[in-house]
Amino acid sequence: MTDASSRPSPSADADAPATGTLSRRLDGLPFTRRHLRVLTGSGIGWALDAMDVGLISFVIAALAVQWDLQRHETAWIASLGFVGMAIGASVGGLLADRFGRRQVFALTLLVYGIATGASALVGGLVALLILRFFVGLGLGAELPVASTYVSEFAPARMRGRLIVILEAFWAVGWTAAALIGYLVIPMSADGWRWAFLLGAIPAVYALIVRWGLPESARWLERRGRFAEAEAVVREFESAAGRPAIAAPVKPETPPPIAPTLRARVAALWAAEFRVRTACLWLVWFCVNFSYYGAFIWIPSILVEQGYDLVRSFGFTLIITLAQLPGYAVAAWLIEVWGRRLTLSVFLVGSAASAVAFGTAGSVGMIIGAGMALSFFNLGAWGALYAVTPEMYPTSLRATGSGWAAGVGRIASIVAPLAVPPLLVAGGAPVLFIVFAVFFAIAAAAAWGLADRRGRALDDR
């Protein structure tokens, strides 16, 4: 499945001299402690994001019992957060292309950290729904901005792998949420409040992001801030043991694809990008529908099938642990098979696992099929986040990533609301067959994406 266009370019040679354009110098670097700092700094934010999203599935299951909530009320707790995420993803990408990746990344952590902490103090459903919307604003903006940020520092030959590793922090956060759900929430009537207080940690971490991580050198160059961009690149070269170059090549930056917010959104549908945009939006929509429809509701579905709260949370914790090997395999395959094949294979595996989970009739089948669903679905997420920033040039990258994520969040709004009527219509088998169909559609749409394995990012 390889061709000349997918092989690493000469600029990706780790032994290349520290000369040439800023982009070539970044792509020619080995992996250094500076890269590790960017990856782990962004990854911790990513894990905290996942912890918050994961916590709400356990909180919903607990509040349904404690507040005697109906299915449509619990569905709205999930969906209002996703309404905020849809808006946050779209606006966050636009802001990141205008004001910088690091600035917006830190702001998103601050917004959803404060709103999550405040959720611990609510006394009723309406206040919780309002705060979940603001939590969603921060969460939705954070993910596409973080993946764009890391992709712009990653050397070309390992870019896909590093983005999948970044996505793997999601499993760390979701596992932390499962542990909190299993150990903290059932301890007392206020266990869910303590869970929300733990979810406020991102508000503190935002300060570390703001002052501890560098701004994207590619973004600085595009904004005409050449001296700052040069300083950032020299820090990475110094970490790699590269000598400072006396006369760096003056960047010749072509005009941006689109100079204004409105023009950037319109440019996503220009002739050059319209096919990849349509396919990318379809993949994001289908994957979000199936993922959030399934994983937000799994604890509640298990409770309704007769398992008590603690046991259903224990099953969910075991199922969640299968996410990490899924990411690990995807991180390896994405630089071997390429983006499209890896993404489509994991989506097909997700479809098959969804059918198996929906028809599982024993504890062993529930856990086995659930672990397979976690493995394939989260591996697919890793591949999707790796390919998304590569679809667009630097001046459109965060906008394109944010709008794709925003369209996906529309599905995550619809999915929790669609689950109750689907369960009434045909129970878990029908519900998970519907999820499998969406996974299959996404697998087909993946073949309309560009595969830039080993190639330099488009710095227009």
Image (cartoon, rainbow, N blue to C red):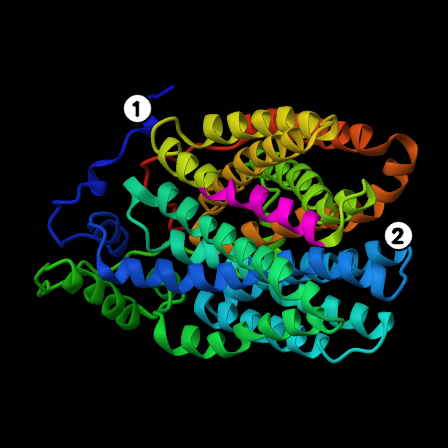
Q: Answer yes or no: do the residues labelled 2 and 1 have beta carbons within 8 Å?
A: no
Q: Is residue 265 left or right of residue 213?
A: right
Q: Residue at x 36, y 70 (%)?
A: 213
Q: Which residues are magenta?
A: 310-324
**Which disc is residue 71 wearing?**
2
**What type is the residue that disc 1 sits on?**
Ala
In this view of the protein, can residue 216 be seen by the observer? yes
Residue 206 lies, in percent from the top left, at: 49, 75
Q: Residue at x 72, y 71 (%)?
A: 188
Residue farthest to the top, as pictured: 1
Residue 370 relative to residue 173: left or right: right
Q: Is residue 314 magenta?
A: yes
Q: Is residue 261 visible?
A: no
Secondary structure mostly seen in the magenta stretch: helix
Residue 119 is drawn in which quadrant? bottom right
The amino acid on which the numbered mark 2 sits, given as a three-letter code, is Arg
Q: Please tell me which residue lies in front, 76 or 136.
A: 76
Which badge, 2 or 1, comes first in the chain's sequence?
Answer: 1
